């Protein structure tokens, strides 16, 4: 419970990696601000369940991360309701694939807005409070694609590379303010969405789910194993810990050796 008394805001946390991170931080005692889209009744069930399971306060804010004013309002609401935003985890993100010459302009703008600009908006709103309190943790969820590239992912790769640069700037600016800024770079993570993709591939190719699981991971990773959302959460929890108080400006791969090649 090394984060008891802290408040953690995790964007894009109603499912997948973000939910895994929120669960780990709640397990460490942090009060949680969930953010994302989805069915309101299902989100309320999730919110109440997390609060009951971990004995922490949990609130939900449906801010559109691509909207600067909405991000400011979310930080203000979280601070007003829970007292602070001590930990900011920028996890929200979207993907679109196409060759550069065929990449729709509106899709480029949308990916950049959510995956990169949204992190800037939330950091800009949260940092003054962190600095005033003399303690803060920013963890940006980038990707192996923040360190290396793949075809057909121009906007995503550009946004994630940019997110690592933004993280480093924040680390330098906050180096003596009690605030750290780091990034986690996941490789393949087994989320419900990825599981659906694997099952669809198995059906289409008339193979087993286990065969398609290994084939998908092996396309990029020397280690033929998925990370779990909770393992990404464990990396985030470490970066928020007292043991990591002098760790800042890093990009931590959790990628089964993807970027070691």
Image: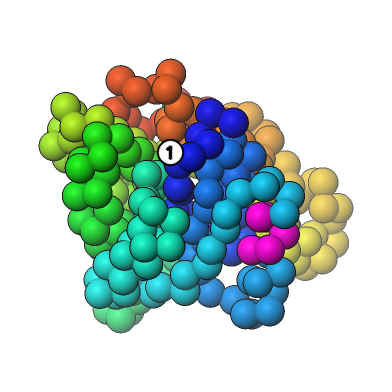
Q: Is residue 115 visible to the viewer in this orientation of the structure?
A: no
User: Mark 1 Cα within 10 Å, few/some/many (few <14, many 20+)?
Assistant: many
Q: Residue at x 63, y 29 (%)?
A: 223
Give the colouring mode of the picture.
Answer: rainbow
Taking the image as shown, residue 162 lies to the left or right of residue 91, namely left
Q: Residue at x 37, y 44 (%)?
A: 86
Mark 1 sits on what residue? 184
49 in magenta: yes
Which of 252 and 97 lies nearest the eye of the viewer?
Answer: 252
Q: Is residue 61 above or below residue 168?
A: below
Using the rendered view, name the quadrant where residue 65 is placed.
bottom left
Residue 67 % position (x, y): 29, 75
Image quadrant occupied by the C terminus: top left
Residue 244 % position (x, y): 39, 22
Using the rendered view, name the quadrant where residue 171 is placed.
top left
Taking the image as shown, residue 112 lies to the left or right of residue 216, namely left
């Amino acid at each position: 419970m090394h984060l008891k008394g802290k408040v953690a805001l995790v964007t894009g946390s109603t499912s997948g990696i973000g939910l895994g991170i929120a669960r780990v931080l709640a397990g460490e005692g942090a009060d949680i601000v969930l953010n994302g889209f989805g069915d309101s009744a299902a989100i309320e069930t999730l919110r109440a369940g997390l609060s009951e399971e971990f004995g922490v306060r949990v609130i939900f804010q449906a801010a559109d991360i691509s909207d600067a004013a909405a991000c400011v309002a979310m930080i203000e609401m979280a601070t007003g309701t829970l007292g602070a935003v001590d930990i900011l985890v920028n996890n929200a993100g979207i993907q679109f694939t196409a060759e550069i010459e065929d990449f729709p302009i509106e899709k480029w703008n949308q990916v950049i807005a959510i995956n990169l600009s949204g992190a800037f908006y939330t950091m800009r709103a949260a940092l003054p409070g962190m600095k005033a309190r003399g303690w803060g943790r920013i963890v940006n969820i980038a990707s192996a694609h923040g360190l290396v590239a793949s075809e057909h992912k121009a906007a995503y790769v550009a946004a994630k590379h940019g997110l690592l640069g933004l993280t480093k700037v924040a680390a330098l600016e906050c180096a003596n303010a009690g605030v750290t800024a780091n990034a986690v770079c996941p490789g393949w993570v087994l989320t419900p969405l990825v599981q659906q993709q694997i099952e669809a591939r198995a059906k289409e190719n008339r193979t087993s789910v286990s065969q398609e699981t290994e084939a998908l991971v092996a396309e990029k990773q020397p280690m033929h194993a998925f990370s779990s959302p909770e393992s990404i959460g464990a990396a985030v929890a470490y970066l928020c810990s007292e043991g990591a108080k002098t760790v800042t400006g890093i990009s931590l791969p959790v990628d089964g050796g993807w970027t070691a090649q």
